Every structure is written in C-alpha cells, then in structure tokens.
Amino acid sequence: MKKSLFVLIALLISGVVFAGGSAESAAPADPNSVKVGLLCIGDENDQGYTFNFIRGRDEATEMLKADGINVEWVTKFNIGEDATCTDANIEAAEEGCQIIFNNSYGFEPFMLEVVDDYPDIEFVSCTNCASAFDGRANTHNAFANIYEGRYIAGVVAGMKLQQMIDEGQITPEQAVIGYVGAYSFAEVISGFTSYFLGARSVCPSVTMKVMFVGSWSDATAESDAALALIDQGCVMISQHSDNTTPATAAQSRGVYHTGYNNDMTGIAPNASLISTRIDWGIYFYEAIKAYVEGEEIPQDWCKGMGEGAVVMTALNEAIAAPGTAEKIAEVEAGLADGSIQVFDTSTFTVGGETLTHAFALDTDGDFTADSEEAVYDGAFHESVFQSAPYFTVQIDGIEWLNAAY
C-alpha cells in the first residue's frame, strides 16, 4: 500500500512537472490575432440596426484578414440597456476579449461601471459621448456623420413628393412626411432635421410630423407609429428606429418610405425608395488594426461619406422620381467639397428667427460655460466637437406629436 501510494505521488509530481514544462515551452500567442467582443441591443433578425453592425463585423474581419490579422469575435445579442449590459461587459472581459464594442446609446453608463476593473481592455461605446471626455485611457466613443446620409435620403424623398405635386397626385400642402423616432435625443433630432432639410431643398412646401416610440427597437410600436402618421395624412414615412416595420406599414397603405441601416426595398418594393446606413466595418477595421499594431485607438472617432463611413443603399429606380440618381451624385459632391452645409442657417428658422447661437452639449447634455459654440460661418456644425450628435434645436416646419421620451 505504501509503495503504491509512493508511486502514485511520484507520477502526479512528474505529471505536474511535465505539464509545467510543456506550458513553458509552448509557442507564444500569435501577435496578429485578437479577441474582440461585440455587445448588441438586438440581433441580426431585426434586419436593421444590429444587422448593420453584424455586417460591419464581418466586413472588418475580411479586411483585417487581408492584412494578416485574425479576429476571434465574441458576439452577444439582445442585451438590455440595464444591468444585463454590465454583466455582458464583465463576461466578455472574463472570456478574454481585448477590445469590447458596445453598440447601443444606452449601454455606456453600464459599460463605464466595468472599465476600471479591466484597465488593459479597450472599451468602446458606439453612438455615445461620455467616454470621449472621461480621461480614461481605455474608453472610447465612435459615431459617423449619418446626418449626411439622412440629408440625401431627404432629397430623394423630396424629389418624389415634388413629382407627386407636379403630377397632381397631391397638393403642395399635402407633401407631409411622417417620421418614426426612437427618442427625443440629439441623435434622433439631428437625424430627422437633416432629413427634413434635404427634402425641403427640392420640395419647398414639405412639412414633417414626428412621433417618438420610446424604444430603439420595438417592431410593433414602430409599425403602429407609422400607421398613425399615415392616418394623419403623411404620404412619406421615414424612421430612426431599428426595425423594418415602418417600411412594411408604408407598403400596406400605399405611401412611400425611406429607411435606415439596411436596404428595405426587398420587403417594401413599392414603397421604399432608399436607405442610409453607417458602415461600421470602417471603424472596426481601423480600431482593431490600431490595437494590433500597438497604436492608440482614437478616444472619439467620427468620419463621414467622404471616408466611406456613411453610405446610401441602392436607389429603387422603379419608383424614384426621374433624375434622382443624378441629384444624389450632385449632393454628394456638394457635401464633399463643402458647398452644401446640411445645417445651413439660411435654410431654416427657429420661431421665425434665423439661428445665430447654439452650443455643442457637454457630456451631461447640459449647456455649460465652456460648451462650444456650434454656429459659425453660417451653419450649425454638427459632430465637429464630439462624434455624437448635439443638434437639439426644434426648427420651424417640423411638428413634434409627442416628446415624452
């Protein structure tokens, strides 16, 4: 018995020594491989917001692979803007993720509860703003100039409305856009205002009604809001919400639509004219490549159409107004060379007055003594002082039907 026990102990010791020796002699980790977390508010089945992030993830993976960089993704779906987001960030960190992207506006406060416990991990909050100013080396914000794409989508919508006026289908007063908004946040206000200004640049009589649904992703509420707007006389529907139901609602009622995050012409071929989206693959590629190459990830990243970060989906030529494709090209060129300013203060009023003074908000959403003046050179300059939008001005011509969110 004693001899057997001695042999067993010897074997165990030799096994430990052997295992330890193997670990010490193992090849080092591949310096061109990285593990990345992506936390999503929805899933790819929404065919909208999260679907667009997944497309960006896959696009970046292929671009990085071409550069010799291998990415292992840990993707978590249907995360709430609550404590489940805190838990998801911890889980991703404990699973070995070296970068963790949070894809929803409301994730940032919960992400920030975690970041100090993992100083060697890079945390990114997409579409938010607090990380840009918090002084931490491992927190980052990212967004894109989506207002440029929304302006062009508005031009497409306005051309269709003007065609309907010219052909006697509607009167000028009936050129009413209905907009489904998630929340009455700066991001949404900036988006529908730029869209409206694009539409009015080609259809001067256009007006807009906005209905907020109090959620980024509630397919039923988005459909209900779109139908309610149509019942109030809106003949064009657009959206800043995550699902395709505003498009299908427009299709069901015989009105037109422009979308967000994904080409919606497949599910609403007789209604949806065009969509705009952020190409998150551009940012994922740049951030991950910087990390692997030992460079700093920008604390606040923002790019626009000129860099490929904002794109338009294919125009639905079957229902678009004649000349729309040519007009898109003209406006894209104007945005690129600066001859078109989306928030040109000569193109809108606030309470009947020209806007001469407005601030870029601080991280708490407040105007402070050191807030930046955003109106200069005849325009409100969106996303210049931070990537996240800060346009909150309620301009004339846009009616907010509710503002409880």
Image: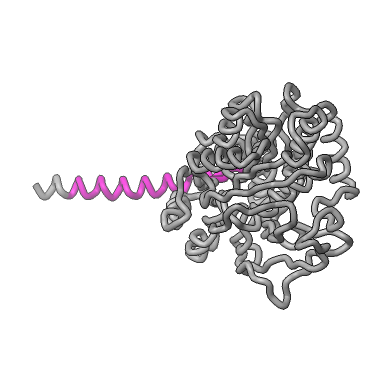
x 81%, y 40%: residue: 203
First to last magenta residue range: 6-35
Choose between 30 and 119: the one closer to the eye.
119
Q: Quadrant of residue 54?
A: top right
x 73%, y 21%: residue: 318
Q: Quadrant of residue 372?
A: bottom right
Horizontal side of 281 relative to 10 (left or right) equals right
Question: Which percent across, then down, holds residue 322?
Answer: 82, 26
Quarter of the image where the C terminus is located: bottom right
x 46%, y 48%: residue: 79
Residue 310 vs 270, above or below: the answer is: below
The extreme bottom residue here reads 369
Find out whether residue 17 is within the magenta segment.
yes
Residue 131 vs 220, above or below: the answer is: below
Q: How many numbered discs? A: 0
Find out whether residue 188 is within the magenta segment.
no
- Visible residue check, residue 53: no
For the stretch drawn in magenta, the main secondary structure is helix
Choose between 291 and 203: the one closer to the eye.
203
